[in-house]
Amino acid sequence: MASSKNVVPEAKEALNRFKMEAASEVGVNLKNGYNGDLTSKQAGSVGGQMVKKMIKAYEESMK
């Protein structure tokens, strides 16, 4: 069973900064805290941008 505790507390803040950066790149206005007013399309575009950036970073590290 997975634990909801953060193994590395600093990772949560880094991931939040990464999410905010991705959101601004795709033009979605995220707020700190609750963002339940976003459409599925907006939330998906943020997640998709995050994945694209992670894949690009991985590919760059393989060079």
Image (cartoon, rainbow, N blue to C red):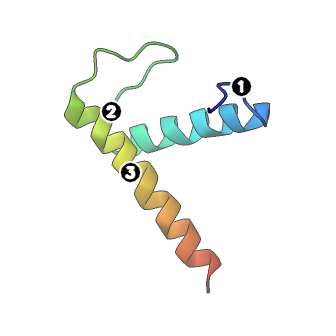
Residue at the image position 56 percent from the left and 42 percent from the top: 18
Q: Quadrant of the C terminus?
A: bottom right
Residue at the image position 48 percent from the left and 66 percent from the top: 55
Q: Quadrant of the N terminus?
A: top right
SS at badge 1: loop
Name, please, the residue furthest toward the front. Answer: 1
In the image, residue 12 sits, relative to residue 57, either above or below, namely: above
Residue 2: image location, x then y, percent:
62, 33
Identify the residue under disc 2.
28
Residue 11: image location, x then y, percent:
71, 38
Identify the residue under disc 1.
5
User: Which amino acid type corresponds to the residue marked 2 in the rendered image?
Assistant: Val
Residue at the image position 56 percent from the left and 67 percent from the top: 57
Q: Is residue 38 left or right of residue 58?
A: left
SS at badge 3: helix
In the image, residue 53 sits, relative to residue 39, either above or below, namely: below
Q: Is residue 45 left or right of residue 10?
A: left
25 or 7: which is nearer to us? 7
Q: Residues within 10 Å of mark 1 (few under 14, many from 20)?
A: few
User: Which amino acid type corresponds to the residue marked 3 in the rendered image?
Assistant: Gln
User: Which amino acid type corresponds to the residue marked 1 in the rendered image?
Assistant: Lys
Residue at the image position 35 percent from the left and 50 percent from the top: 48
Q: CA distance from mark 2 to mark 1?
A: 28 Å
Identify the residue under disc 3.
49
